[in-house]
Amino acid sequence: FFRIHPFLQYPRKHHYKGFLPEIFHGRPIIRKAAHVYRRFCDNKMAISDLQGAVGNQIKYIIRDIITSIVFNRALCQLLRQSFNKVYRILKVVTITSLRDAVRNLANLVGRRSI
């Protein structure tokens, strides 16, 4: 259809200098330009897909972090409540056992066992 010009077919023989021979090495310019443009579009699509994927990953990571913070806060609150309950129980038990010990000691002293 189009006659391929020799300087397009053999890039080392033509009189271009610079980066163009590297891009259009030995292929018709229109076809090569279309190919380069298509590659560019593919790369652009790939980059936008990648950006979307990275954005989603970041969104999921942030969601996980927030979830873990909320969960950790709830867990800390639960632990604090449990600790307070245990502490109250221990305090009551200790006070009771201390009273019992004092009472027992007083009884022993009263009976002149000690």
Image (cartoon, rainbow, N blue to C red):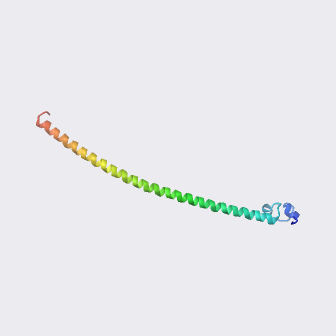
Q: Which of 11 and 53 is in front in this view?
A: 53
Q: Which residue lies furthest to the front in this view?
A: 1
Q: Nearer the viewer, residue 98 or 67?
A: 67
Residue appearing at x 81%, y 60% in the figure:
25
Residue at the top extreme, as displayed: 113
Q: What x and y, as percent, mark residue 101?
A: 19, 40
Q: Residue at x 13, y 38 (%)?
A: 107
Quarter of the image holding residue 53?
bottom right
Name which residue lies at 73% across and 63% down: 38
User: x, y (%) of residue 104?
Assistant: 17, 38
Residue 34, position as x, y percentages in the image: 76, 65
Residue 86: % across, % down: 31, 47
- Asked if residue 90 lies left or right of residue 75, the reply is left
Q: In this view, does 56 lie to the left or right of 19?
A: left
Classify residue 111 by image quadrant: top left
Q: State which quarter of the image contains the C terminus.
A: top left
Q: Can residue 46 be seen in this view?
A: yes
- Image quarter where the N terminus lies is bottom right
- How many callouts does the rendering have? 0
Q: Would residue 18 be visible to someone looking at this image?
A: no
Up-down relation of residue 102 to residue 27 (above or below) = above
